[in-house]
Image (cartoon, rainbow, N blue to C red):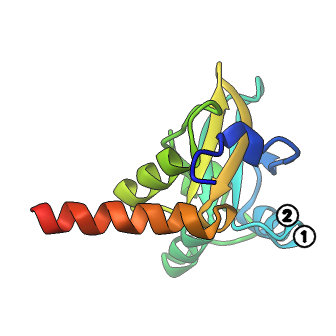
């Protein structure tokens, strides 16, 4: 179970892709409608340029940004970390844990293949990460 490839996890996924000109309000509505915690921001060639998450929305609102006029280009996380679809679940969990984020785009050859979040992983995969982190802390 801890050896699942990311391509298997996202094989039937249809991630929400939005252009950078999308307003904060429209992005939040799309996230709500799709039941997701993030959207991937892509350019006119569908190349990933950013990610917009619930955390980004809270930060933007706390700064006083207008949901009706603020665009994703202004508030997204630019050039997010990505991972290839041939990597394993544990690899994605390590990247997210090390980076302190909960969403990780899957990209191959410049094309978005999907996105994973911590909730996409099974108990044994999370347990393995927790064990690795515990062992690392013990050794340090």
Does residue 15 appear to the left or right of 109 in the view shown?
A: right
Does residue 102 appear to the left or right of 68 in the view shown?
A: left
Per the image, the residue denoted by label 1 is: 33
Q: CA distance from mark 2 to mark 1?
A: 5 Å
User: Would you say residue 63 is visible in this rendering?
Assistant: yes
Q: Residue at x 15, y 68 (%)?
A: 138
Does residue 30 appear to the left or right of 137 in the view shown?
A: right
Q: Is residue 18 above or below residue 45?
A: below
Nearer to me, 36 or 117: 117
Q: Secondary structure at mark 1?
A: helix
Q: Is residue 134 above or below residue 114?
A: below
Q: Residue furthest left?
A: 140
Q: Residue at x 62, y 60 (%)?
A: 117
Where is residue 111? Give x, y as percent.
71, 26
Q: Secondary structure at mark 2?
A: helix
Q: Residue at x 65, y 45 (%)?
A: 4
Q: Residue furthest top?
A: 109
Quadrant of image for the N terminus: bottom right
Nearer to me, 103 or 80: 103
Quadrant of image for the C terminus: bottom left
Nearer to me, 120 or 80: 120
Where is residue 87? Give x, y as percent.
56, 35
Q: Residue at x 56, y 77 (%)?
A: 58
User: Would you say residue 20 is visible in this rendering?
Assistant: no
Where is residue 77? Give x, y as percent.
52, 52
- Badge 1 crowding class, 10 Å Cα cut-off, few under 14, some 14 to 19, many 20 or more, is few
- Badge 2 crowding class, 10 Å Cα cut-off, few under 14, some 14 to 19, many 20 or more, is some
The image quadrant that residue 65 belongs to is bottom right
Q: Is residue 105 above or below residue 26?
A: above
Per the image, the residue denoted by label 2 is: 30
C-beta proximity under 8 Å, tags 2 and 1: yes
Where is residue 89? Give x, y as percent.
58, 49
């Amino acid at each position: 179970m801890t050896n699942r490839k990311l391509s298997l996890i996202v094989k039937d996924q249809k991630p929400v892709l939005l252009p950078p000109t999308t307003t904060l309000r429209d992005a939040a509505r799309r996230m709500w409608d799709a039941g997701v915690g993030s959207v991937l921001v892509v350019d006119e060639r569908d190349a990933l340029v950013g990610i917009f998450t619930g955390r980004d929305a809270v930060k933007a609102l706390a700064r006083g940004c207008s949901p009706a006029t603020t665009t994703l280009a202004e508030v997204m996380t630019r050039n997010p970390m990505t991972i290839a679809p041939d990597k394993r679940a544990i690899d994605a969990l390590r990247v997210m844990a090390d980076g302190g984020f909960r969403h990780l785009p899957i990209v191959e050859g410049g094309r978005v293949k999907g996105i994973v979040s911590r909730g996409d992983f099974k108990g044994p995969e999370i347990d393995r990460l927790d064990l690795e982190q515990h062992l690392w802390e013990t050794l340090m």
